[in-house]
Image: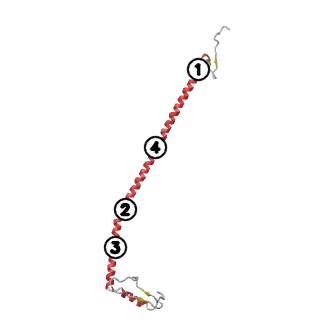
Amino acid sequence: GGGKDDAAEDNDSGRADEGGGKRARVETKGGGTGGGTKTKTKNLEAYSGDAVKKRNRRMFGALMGHLGNARSAIKRDSKLIEQKAKVEQTVRNKNAESSVRIRKLERQMSISEKEKAFTKRDQILCQMRQTELSMLTEEWIQRQQKLKQFIGTKTEPVLFWMPNPNPGGD
């Protein structure tokens, strides 16, 4: 620290030592350039006790155990994640296939509905033509009945004339 008169504690930020021993407290005075080697040696002395070494080994072992457990949990969970991903993918595929099938069925239904509508329209048109034909035939028969007493020519346009019923006497 540059120019601080306050006491600087070591890196454990004020926690009590688990070994039961007291910590070394290092005070810095002055501009920070003088007396730096004393601070380093006192810090090294504070971490060199047997209780500290035991604590460090225990903490390192706990950390390694935690990391090992985490690694095995990741391996175990990665298999579950892969299985879930496979299941989700198959569900997506089945949904896509079913949506394609549904679209095809809708198209077929719309096509069959259109065909039914066209068939119905054709039937109605056919009935209209038959009715029109029968009406025209009826009109033609009525005209022919009226023209029955006349004789028509074979030329175009057809001329109708009525022969004289009494050819000799007038």
CA–CA distance between discs 4 and 3?
62 Å
Mark 1 and mark 2 residues within 8 Å of each other at the beta carbon: no
Mark 4 and mark 1 residues within 8 Å of each other at the beta carbon: no
Q: Quadrant of residue 16?
A: bottom left
Q: Quadrant of residue 77?
A: bottom left
Question: Which residue does the image show at 33% across and 76% down from the upper left?
Answer: 62
Q: Secondary structure at mark 4?
A: helix
Which residue matches tag 3?
66
- Amino acid under disc 2: Glu
Looking at marks 2 and 4 on the same chain, the residue that comes earlier in the sequence is marked by: 2
Foreground mark, 3 or 2, reads 3
CA–CA distance between discs 3 and 2?
24 Å
Q: Secondary structure at mark 1?
A: helix
How packed is label 4: few (under 14 Cα within 10 Å), some, or many (20 or more)?
few
Looking at marks 1 and 3 on the same chain, the residue that comes earlier in the sequence is marked by: 3
Question: Which residue does the image show at 33% across and 75% down from the upper left?
Answer: 64
Instruction: Residue 14: give x, y in percent of width and height.
Output: 40, 83
CA–CA distance between discs 1 and 2?
91 Å
In the rendered view, does 102 fall on the left or right side of 142?
left
- Amino acid under disc 1: Gln
How packed is label 2: few (under 14 Cα within 10 Å), some, or many (20 or more)?
few
Which residue matches tag 2?
82
- Amino acid under disc 3: His
Q: Secondary structure at mark 2?
A: helix
Determine whether 18 is above or below 116 in the image. below
